[in-house]
Amino acid sequence: MRSMLFVPGNRPDLVVKALASGVDALIFDLEDSVPEASKGAARDNLAGIEALPVPLFVRVNGADTGHLWEDVTAAGSRGVAGVVLPKAEDPATIQRIDGALTALEIAGGGERGSTAIVPLVESASGVLATYDLCRASLRVRTILFGSGEEGDLVADLGCEWSPEGTGLLTARASVLMAARAAGVEEPMEAVFMDFRNLDGLRTECLLARRLGYVGKVAIHPQQVAVINEVFTPSPEVVAKSRRIVDEFEKAVAQGSASIAVDGRMVDYAVARVSRAVLARAHAATASRPATSNESEA
């Protein structure tokens, strides 16, 4: 996934508009975008969401809210692609959610382990616990870094936020490194709050991509095109990577594992990077047909 887009759980009518953005996945939000008095109704709305052309995730309420287990039950019963756990800090909570989802999958006749758990890191404790969060369950296949302006992590760290990412750089890199070390291959960034500032969004996306993140979460449909563009390898990069892989494979077949391509030395490590680029490009192409919005963009 390059992009995910939040849809407030009390506004299921926005799902169609969200899909038209060309996003790779939706997050049906039961947490921050839903008033306390509407939590139950939003949870009930989930059951009415019909089959979608993209994966559907659910952001549940946190462990300290009194809503978590009802949310997990609703999500698991609906058979969603995954649950997003906000303010993730405790690996034991992820393990308990894993057990609950397994029971729901068995009861519903679904495939065991098919529902992912996506920790959202939004605190200093969460940053330090990232490796253990990722290792707590095989269901953790991606993790979200809470990069939002004036978000919980910014408040917790007491840092200054900017699109250039200076204040959050240590935390951003720490979460990325811990996730990769734990074997999570698709770490993503959370939201950019100013949905009108597409230049700032692009700046933050580029920083995230350079560090090793593979995608970002949007809060507004108009952010999706920028996110998809930044996290999709350009045709020039794809062509270069294809040339490197092809030439290297020919060389290996002839008994050499170190060659020059376009004046640059290529070995197994360089070829591995190029193969990763090709895999991302293929995944982006195969994710879903372009919408009219994407064509116009």
Image (cartoon, helix red, strand yellow):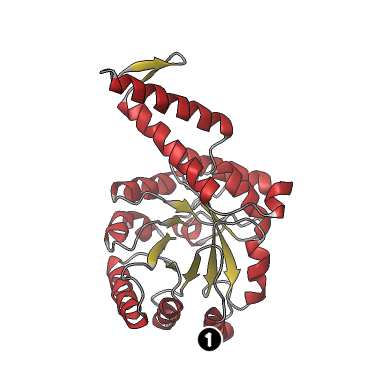
Q: In the depicted view, which residue is nearer to us: 297 or 182?
A: 297
Could you say where residue 164 lies in the image, as x and y percent from the top left?
56, 41
Circle 1 residue: 40
Could you say where residue 194 lies in the image, as x and y percent from the top left?
65, 55
Looking at the image, can residue 196 be seen?
no
Left or right: where 238 falls relative to 246: right
Could you say where residue 179 lies in the image, as x and y percent from the top left?
34, 51
Residue at figure coordinates x 32%, y 49% from the top left: 178
Residue at figure coordinates x 56%, y 68% from the top left: 52
Residue sitting farthest toward the right = 296
**Is 27 above or below relative to 196?**
below
Q: How many marks?
A: 1
**Is 65 above or below relative to 117?**
below
- Identity of the amino acid at label 1? Gly
Q: In the depicted view, which residue is nearer to us: 268 or 144?
A: 268
State the image quarter where residue 157 is shown: bottom left
Could you say where residue 167 lies in the image, as x and y percent from the top left?
49, 46
* Label 1: few (<14), some (14–19) or many (≥20) C-alpha neighbours in 10 Å: some
Residue at figure coordinates x 47%, y 47% from the top left: 214
**Is 30 above or below relative to 267?**
below
Secondary structure beneath disc 1?
A: helix
Q: In the depicted view, which residue is nearer to us: 144 or 241?
A: 241
State the image quarter where residue 133 is shown: bottom left
Looking at the image, can residue 119 be seen?
yes
